[in-house]
Image: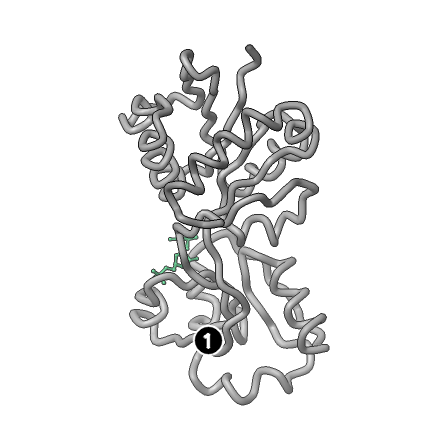
């Protein structure tokens, strides 16, 4: 039988996904041990799990190197890959928001070429352009984005807010909610046609657990 390959976004989402798959009877308990292995095999169910950097999960799934992916909606929106977004898993809940110093709340939508720092340049650009009709200057960063408005690199940031602690501890606020985020189960379009039955049985198992029609 062909192995179905499931790509998990390394980090917290992978941990939550592993617990979900173990609960469904798949054998991926070895992944809970802290090793540097990247591929794990459940021989009995003919499933392989691969650990991938979050932003690469949609790439693996679009090209068919993975049949299935578990990845955040933020990454899906940013990467814009051609794949089938099948189930909102409901875990890893957070939101995408425009954040900054409180005094930017009323000012920001009026500023020409507003300087916006983000790890998500596509999401940031399309929000300001499509929803607000505003041109912005994007400053692409790779982490600690909250620093940018504090040191004068940007007027505001577009970033993930989960507990809100990072903002609070750095004197910043949510200025505008862009969209809610959570983990999604995504499928390669060809795999969906070729292995419909097996993929649907995994989907049913997930739906039973998350109670999501
Ligand atoms: C993410 C995000 C925020 C923070 C939000 O960063 O970019 O900085 O978590 O979480 P909170 O609202 O619970 O504080 P991450 O931890 O991935 O680190 P990074 O800044 O290095 O990307």
Q: Residue at x 35, y 41 (%)?
A: 16
| Depth check, front residue: 4 or 208 | 208
Picture quarter with ligand 1: bottom left
Q: What kind of colouring is applied to the model shown? A: one colour
To which residue does mark 1 refer? 100
* Rendered view: 158 above or below 76: below
Q: Which residue is found at the position 47% from the left and 20% from the top? A: 48
Judge from the rendering whether residue 174 lies leftward or rightward of residue 64; answer left or right.
left
* Residue 169, image quadrant: bottom left
Local SS, label 1: strand
On screen, residue 169 above or below 14: below
Q: Report the front residue among 74 and 17.
A: 17
Q: Position of residue 130 (x, y in %)?
A: 71, 70
x, y percentage for residue 136? 67, 72
Which quarter of the rendered picture does the N terminus lie within? top right
20 and 99: which is toward the camera:
20
> Residue at 42% of width from left, 65% of height from top?
147
How many residues crowd around disc 1 within 10 Å: few (fewer than 14), some, or many (20 or more)?
A: many
Residue 195 % position (x, y):
62, 24
| Residue 185, image x, y percentages | 52, 41
Instruction: Give the residue at x 54% y 61%.
Output: 118
């Amino acid at each position: 039988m062909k192995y179905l390959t499931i790509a998990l976004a390394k980090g917290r989402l992978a941990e939550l996904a592993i617990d979900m798959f173990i609960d469904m009877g798949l054998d991926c308990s070895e992944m809970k041990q802290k090793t540097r292995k990247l591929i794990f095999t459940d021989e009995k169910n003919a499933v392989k799990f691969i650990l991938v950097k979050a932003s690469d999960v949609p790439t693996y799934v679009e090209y068919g190197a993975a049949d299935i992916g578990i990845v955040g909606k933020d990454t899906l929106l940013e990467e814009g890959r051609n794949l089938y977004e099948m189930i909102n898993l409901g875990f890893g809940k957070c939101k995408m928001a425009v954040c900054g110093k409180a005094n930017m709340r009323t000012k920001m939508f009026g500023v020409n070429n507003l300087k916006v720092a983000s790890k998500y340049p596509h999401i940031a650009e399309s929000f300001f352009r499509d929803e607000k009709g505003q041109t912005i200057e994007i400053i692409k960063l790779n982490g600690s984005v909250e620093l940018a408005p504090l040191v004068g690199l940007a007027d505001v940031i577009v970033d993930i807010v989960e507990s809100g602690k990072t903002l609070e501890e750095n004197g910043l606020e949510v200025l505008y909610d862009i969209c809610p985020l959570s983990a999604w189960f995504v499928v390669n379009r060809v795999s969906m046609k070729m292995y419909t039955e097996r993929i649907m049985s995994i989907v049913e198992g997930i739906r039973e657990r998350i109670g999501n029609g």
